[in-house]
Amino acid sequence: MTRTVATVAVALLALAATASDAQARHRVYHPTVGRFMQRDPLGTPNESPLTRNLSSHEFTRRDPAAQYRDGMNLYQYVHSVPSGYVDPMGLWNSDVHHDLTKELATMAGIACAEEVAAGANAPDEHEGSRPGMDGVIDAVKQLLLGVRPGPKIALMAIWHFPVSPDGEVHPDSPEARKIMEEGLEDCDFKRFTEGLHVLQDSWSHQGRPYISGIGHGRGAVWVDKGSGGYWQEERGTLNAALSGNTDRADLWPADVRAAGKATYEALKKFKEKCPCHCPGPDDSRKPTSSGDAADDKKVNDYLDGKFPGPNLPRP
């Protein structure tokens, strides 16, 4: 197969894999019944859009426990706690940007913990920073088809791939902290909370972006051993670039703990420096503090208990 034909084939595979998600993202929610009408697709052994369409039998054979990591009910909506969590993409998993941020903001004694969490999750929800369908997948697909979506790439790089001068995304780098620290300096609630997203992504999106400044630098691949298998990290591949499993907290718990600690420190600084900057009605501001912050040991114990264990092994 020539390079041109191979490129077109990969592009068509990406197009076919994402087309089924375009109408209702990943699954359809029935508001009257109060549940999704399809099972959660995050149990697949490899969440790349190129392999997402594996049958239920195939992925449960490879990793039987994976589909139950959020509970036995594969059709429920956010652990049946819609007042506390959200799942706008139809993909329920341990959501660092919203759920963990909300918990940490509450522990920090911030009165508007929900607004903080919504801000940290916003770059994944705003079309300006997450353009069309699956964001990275959509942009890479266009590149493979010969289209150069420059503005999309620039926005995605700003909000999801804070590259350092060496061309890689490094956890907790100055580039990753830039937007958050600008918001902290100016007591700009919106910029600070949305900057937390970039800081957190510097752990999950670490590595060299695959193409034109976007595309996850790392991912995970399921190594099949017949009767069993295991997850293993991979870097520098198309599969890693398009994969959603780089954001799975169960595969990278050490990184989630580190991101959580950095987030908590930033939240405490915002609370101290900006005492009356929680959003109020009609653009007003309310007190930021709701009480004392938890000590570092309590936060570390919480993170260690919720996200135990090491990251995936590298080959």
Image (spheres, rainbow, N blue to C red):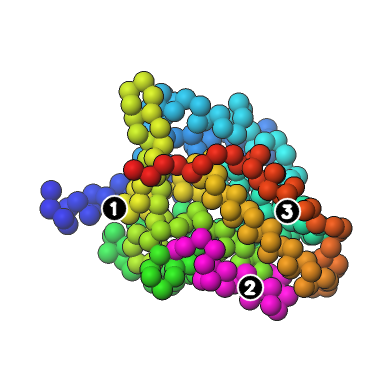
Residue 74 forms part of the magenta stretch:
no
Predominant SS along the magenta part: helix
State the extent of the magenta-drawn residues as a range. Answer: 169-190
Position of 66 with respect to 16 (left or right) is right
Local secondary structure at mark 2: helix
Residue at the far top in the pictured view: 227
Residue 187 forms part of the magenta stretch:
yes
The quadrant where residue 236 appears? bottom left
Q: Which residue is mark 1?
A: 11
Q: CA distance from mark 2 to mark 3?
A: 21 Å
In this view, 236 is above or below 183: above
Local secondary structure at mark 1: helix
Instruction: State the residue at coordinates (64%, 42%).
Output: 304
In this view, 213 is above or below 113: below
Image quadrant for the C terminus? top left
Q: CA distance from mark 1 to mark 2?
A: 38 Å
Q: Which residue is mark 2?
A: 181
Q: Nearer the viewer, residue 90 or 295?
A: 295
Q: Which residue is mark 3?
A: 296
Q: Is residue 304 visible?
A: yes
The amino acid type, in three-letter code, at marker 3 is Asp
Instruction: State the residue at coordinates (86%, 67%).
Output: 287
Instruction: State the residue at coordinates (73%, 49%).
Output: 297
